[in-house]
Image (cartoon, helix red, strand yellow):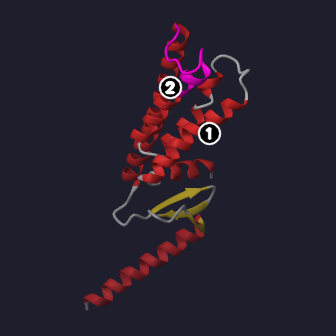
């Protein structure tokens, strides 16, 4: 169920337009606010606080907005929480921190993009011309189709098999009767 929910979230359309910009600002403001509450954080905590928000932006927004959030996160972490305030790259440690933050953010964004791509390929490969996909799970037959929001349980596979055979027999009989 959780895997299906995550797949649906990745397959959902991304937030665009003014709402995406607002979400991007939120993805920068919330962790910055959290970090502002406690100045006694261990080294590196300022950067890692932004990672969940980078991940959320990668899931919900178009990649360009995710990259903006990632770059903004590194800049805000360096300017406000590493070394003297409002100075960037003031020491080799800050440069290293910024570089590792950006590399980690890139890996997060690229991994989510890869999952999206794989999910799109999988749905194309398994889709039928009608869009209906039948599956079997724990002895039950299920059907799903694009836009259904999730699979629908049809019943125990034995019953569904009998019903489908009856349905196919009725179709065949109908075809033979209409040919006369």
The residue shown at (51%, 13%) is: 96
Instruction: Classify mark 1: residues with Cα within 10 Å, few (<14), some (14-19) or many (20+).
Output: some
Q: Are marks 1 and 2 in contact (CB under 8 Å)?
A: no
The residue lying toward the viewer, choosing from 31 and 102, is 31
Location of residue 10 in the rendering, given as x and y in whole percent from the top left corner: 49, 48
Q: Residue 75: which disc?
A: 2
- Residue in view at x 55 percent, y 70 percent: 160
The percent coordinates of residue 121 (x first, y second) are 38, 46
How many badges with numbers are in the image? 2
From this viewpoint, which residue is outermost toward the left? 180
The relative height of residue 120 versus residue 93 in the rendered view (above or below) is below
User: What range of the chain is rendered magenta?
Assistant: 74-91
Closer-to-camera residue (35/125): 35
Q: Is residue 7 above or below residue 140?
A: above
Residue 155 lies, with reference to residue 22, above or below; the image says below
Q: Which part of the image, by quadrant, shows the C terminus?
A: bottom left
Query: For this rendering, which residue is in front, 11 or 124?
Result: 11
Q: Is residue 82 magenta?
A: yes
Q: From the viewer's perspective, is 114 left or right of 79? A: left
What secondary structure is marked by label 1? helix
Report if residue 73 lies within the magenta region.
no
Which disc is residue 43 wearing?
none
Residue under label 1, please give it: 30
Q: Where residue 140 sits: x, y (%)?
A: 61, 62
Q: Earlier in the sequence, mark 1 or mark 2?
A: 1
Q: Please provide percent x and percent y for residue 55.
A: 54, 37
In the image as oriented, which residue stretches furthest toward the bottom? Answer: 180
């Amino acid at each position: 169920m959780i895997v299906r929910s995550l797949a649906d979230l990745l397959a959902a359309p991304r937030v665009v337009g003014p709402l995406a910009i607002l979400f991007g600002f939120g993805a920068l403001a919330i962790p910055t606010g959290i970090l502002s509450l406690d100045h006694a954080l261990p080294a590196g905590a300022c950067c890692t606080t932004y990672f969940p928000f980078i991940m959320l932006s990668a899931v919900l927004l178009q990649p360009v907005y995710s990259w903006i959030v990632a770059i903004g996160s590194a800049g805000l972490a360096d300017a406000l929480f590493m070394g003297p305030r409002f100075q960037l790259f003031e020491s080799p440690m800050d440069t290293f921190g910024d570089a590792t933050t950006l590399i980690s953010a890139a890996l997060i964004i690229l991994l989510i993009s890869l999952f999206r791509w794989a999910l799109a390929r999988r749905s194309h490969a398994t889709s039928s011309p009608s869009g209906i996909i039948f599956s079997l799970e724990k002895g039950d037959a299920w059907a799903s189709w694009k836009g259904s929001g999730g699979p629908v349980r049809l019943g125990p596979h034995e019953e569904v098999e009998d019903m489908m055979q009856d349905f196919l027999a009725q179709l065949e009989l109908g075809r033979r009767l209409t040919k006369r």
